[in-house]
Image (tube, rainbow, N blue to C red):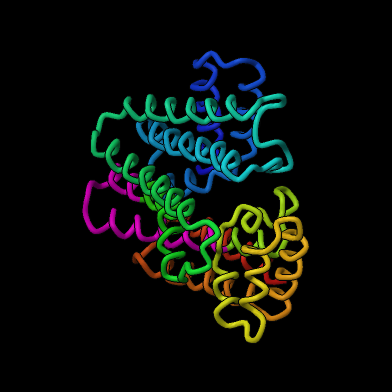
Amino acid sequence: MSENFLNRLDLYLEDVLRAEGLTDRDAAFLLKAIRNGKKLRARLFLGFAGGAGEQEMMAAASIELFHYATLVHDDIIDNASMRRRGRPGPDGADTVSRVLLGDLLFSTGFSVLAGLEDERIWKEVNAALSGVIKGELLQQERKWDLGLTEEEYMGMIRLKTGSLFGGACKVASIMRSGHGPDALESEKFGILLGTSYQILDDCLDMAGSYTDKEAFKDAANGIVTLPVIAFAREGGAGSREMVDAVYAGDPAFRKERTEELSSLLVSDGFLTKCLDRAERLLDEAALVTGKLPVAAVEVLEYMRGKIHEAKL
């Protein structure tokens, strides 16, 4: 049922976006992004919703539209030139056009959300989206700050990435059976999984492992992540100086210093330790509720596979 639902979701999103009267350029970019997306949040939503009617389709679509909107804006914030083996925006689009395209996706998401009959769903999706934005704001405030603690980092990524994963699971549970322990457990599952996802993403960036995104973008943009925090704290003599050279040294040598730091993170086992932390979050998520939906188990195992892959 999941693939059928996701195919229908693709078509629904395409219809919604075409109805916005986008230019051919912008429509082509967004439709390609929709088709290429992993749709992990939508997969989780389907699993916890237990149904795939019109209202479920609209809720899942709004969550995906908000996710795409944050990706468009993230790439502007990060000054990214590549995502998913392609450009982070339509060919020829300048920064202003990309900002407005992200804004349009937010607007479209809210338009879809307004069509839902249960206003509780509006509030929960909006709360999840607010969490994402608050996490991004915190991250921007703490850029270049090597005083960032592991606890503060974890709090930021729970908001930034965990919120929308958790929101998708919680909203789905509410649509299935209303508010209650099930909805809260589902939300906790999603937050744990999303937090694990962000740790993995941060490890892959610092390892220079991405083939479909630029490597070392976090360090280039002053974003302090778990591998860096762990190395500065536990790396022994010279570790803090190495981190300082990346984040507070001459920008002209930042990429070279980041490559050196990356090598040490790999050789000294810090990336593996952080990946272990990500996997423990998955273990914790698996125990949150008595019986996970099949789709949730599939996403969990997909994530576990990606973590194991990153350790090789």
- Residue at the image position 44 percent from the left and 25 percent from the top: 108
- Residue at the image position 64 percent from the left and 42 percent from the top: 79
* Main SS, magenta residues: helix
Q: Is residue 48 above or below residue 111?
A: below
Quadrant position of residue 73: top right
Quadrant position of residue 39: top right
Number of numbered callouts drawn: 0
Residue 15 relative to residue 36: left or right = left
- Residue at the image position 50 percent from the left and 42 percent from the top: 1
Q: Position of residue 102 (x, y in %)?
A: 52, 31
Asked if the stretch drawn in magenta spans residue 33, the answer is: no
- Residue at the image position 73 percent from the left and 78 percent from the top: 267
Q: Position of residue 285 (x, y in %)?
A: 42, 66
Residue 164 relative to residue 124: left or right = right
Q: Is residue 12 above or below residue 125?
A: above
Residue 215 relative to residue 11: left or right = right
Residue closest to the eye, 199 or 293? 199
Residue 203, visible in the rendered structure = yes
Q: Quadrant of the C terminus?
A: bottom right
Asked if the stretch drawn in magenta spans residue 183, the answer is: yes
Residue 295, visible in the rendered structure = no
Q: Is residue 232 above or below residue 23?
A: below
Q: Position of residue 152 (x, y in %)?
A: 42, 66
Provide the residue span drawn in magenta: 170-199
